[in-house]
Amino acid sequence: MNKNTREEVIMRIVEILLVEAPHKPGYMAKVLGVIGEFGATVEGLNAVRRLDKETIWEVTLEYDDTLSIDVLFDQINQLPDTFITGKSDRVFNRHKQGKIQTISRVSIDSLEILRDVYTPGVARVCQAIQKSPSKINEFTNIQNTVAIVTNGTAILGLGDIGPEAGLPVMEGKAAIFAELVGLSGVPILIKEKDPLKIIEVVEAISPSFGAILLEDIKAPECFTIEDELIKRVPKPVFHDDQHGTAMVVLAALLSATKQIGVDLKDKVFAQVGLGAAGMGICNLLSEYGVKQVVGCDLNEDAQKKLRAMGGEPMSLEECMKTADVVVATTGVKGLIKPEMIREGQIIMALTNPDPEIEPSVALANGAIFATCGKVVNNMLAFPGLFKGTLDAGVTEITHPMKIAVSETLSNLARDGALVPASLNKAAHEGVAKAVYQAAIKQKNEYL
C-alpha cells in the first residue's frame, strides 16, 4: 500500500523560452496554439524587446517531465519566421549557488569589534558559559538554530536517492525557516542507513543546535531514530514527515467538519497507507480524541504498529465501508475507486501530484467533502512549531503543542478555506504564539 516508485512520480517542469516572432497579428497566437497542443501550460507571457519587424517574447511554460521539450522547440521553429532564441529553467536558476548562506549579525568593521567578537574578547564569553552552561542561550545563536538532518532515503516522492541529492530539499527547509520565522536551519547530511549509527551521529552533534528536525528518512527506521533521539537528546527532536503532515491534516479536518457541522471525535477515521505520514496522522488524531481509528497497509509491521496504538487494521475495502473520514497517503495514483465512496464521507487523498482519487470524482460519487495534497502542506506547521518551542525553552515537542498548531491553523483559515495560505506570515506567527503558550503551560504544570 505504501508503494512509491519513481515511475509513479510525474515532475512538473517550469521553463522560460525566448521566442522571436514577426510583429504582425496572429503570429504569437500560432505559437501559443502549438504550446497548447504540446500539452504545456503558459504561466507567463511578456514582450521583452521590440525589434524592427519582430518582437522577442518571454514565455514561461509548465509541463510534465514525460513530455520531450525538444519536440516543442522543433514545432515552434517550423512556424513561419518564428524562432526560439534562448531558454532557461526557472527552478534551476533559483537553485544556483544554493538557497541559503550564513551571515554575521555583527558588522565587523573595526579592530575593536573584531577583538570583542573574536580573540581576545570571546574568551571571557567562553569562560562564562563554562561556569554557567545555560548562558549559551543568551550569548550564542543556539536557541535560533535547527539541525535539518537527513540520510536521503525518502526524499519527497523520489525515494532513496542519497543525502547529497536531498540537499536542495534541506536547503529549502532552511530558507523557509529563515524567511517565515527568522530561525537558522542548518542542513546535515548523513551518509548512513544504520539507525543506531544515525542516532549516535545526531546525538554527538546535538550540542551545536537548539533543536533537531529529522527529514526524509524512510520508515520504519524513522520511528526508531526519532524515539531514541527523544530519549537521548535533551532538546526538541521532531520528524517532519510524520508529525508535520499530521498537524496540517488535523487542521484541515477540523475546518472541514466545522463547515459541515459534525464532531470529528465522534466519527470513524480511516488512514489508508501507514508509512511515516500515515502513522503520524493516526497517532495525532488518537491523541486529539478520535474514538475509532482504523487503517490499511500491506506491510504487516505497519499493521502491528497501528494495533499497538489502539487502532484497528483493515483491508482497503473494509476501511472505505466503515469510515466516515478517510485520509490517504499511499503514493498510489487512483487507488481509491469511485464505487468505494459512500454517501456523506469526507475524503482527503493527499498523494502528489496525482491523488488516490480526484476530489471532483469523490464528490460526484457521494462524498460530502473532498480535497487533495495540494492544500495540505506541512510547511504550514513546522516553522511556527519550532519557533514557539525554542522561544519557550522546552526540551520536548508534546502532543498538546502539536494540537495547538492544528487548532490555530484551522481557526486562522478564512472564507471557507481549510487552512491559511502557506506564505501567510501572520499564520506562522500565530502558530508560534500558540505553541509557545502551550509549552509554557505544560512547563508550569511540571514545576
Image (tube, grey):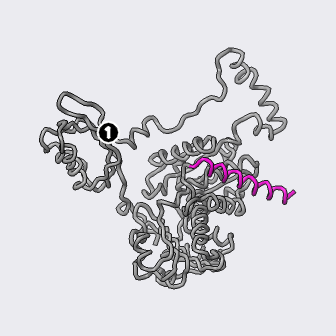
Residue 425 sits inside the magenta stretch: yes
Q: Residue at x 73, y 46 (%)?
A: 391
Is residue 413 depicted above or below 211 in this figure? below
Q: Quadrant of residue 105?
A: top right
Q: Position of residue 214 (x, y in %)?
A: 59, 53
Q: Position of residue 16 (x, y in %)?
A: 32, 41
* Residue where numbered disc 1 is placed: 46
Is residue 365 depicted above or below 48 in this figure? below
Quadrant in which the C terminus appears:
bottom right
Residue 188 sits inside the magenta stretch: no
Left or right: 270 as drawn, with respect to 116: left
Give SS at disc 1: strand
Residue 221 in view in this figure: no
Q: Residue furthest right?
A: 447
The one of 193 and 252 positioned closer to us in this rendering = 252
Q: What amino acid type should be assigned to the residue bearing mark 1?
A: Asn
Magenta-tinted stretch = 424-447
Q: Residue at x 17, y 46 (%)?
A: 74
Q: Residue at x 58, y 70 (%)?
A: 259
What is the crowding at mark 1: few (fewer than 14 residues within 10 Å), some, or many (at least 20)?
few
Q: Residue at x 59, y 44 (%)?
A: 180
Left or right: 105 as drawn, with respect to 74: right
The one of 340 and 189 positioned closer to us in this rendering = 340
Is residue 56 depicted above or below 324 in this figure? above
Q: Position of residue 162 (x, y in %)?
A: 46, 51
Residue 239 in view in this figure: yes
Magenta span dominant secondary structure: helix
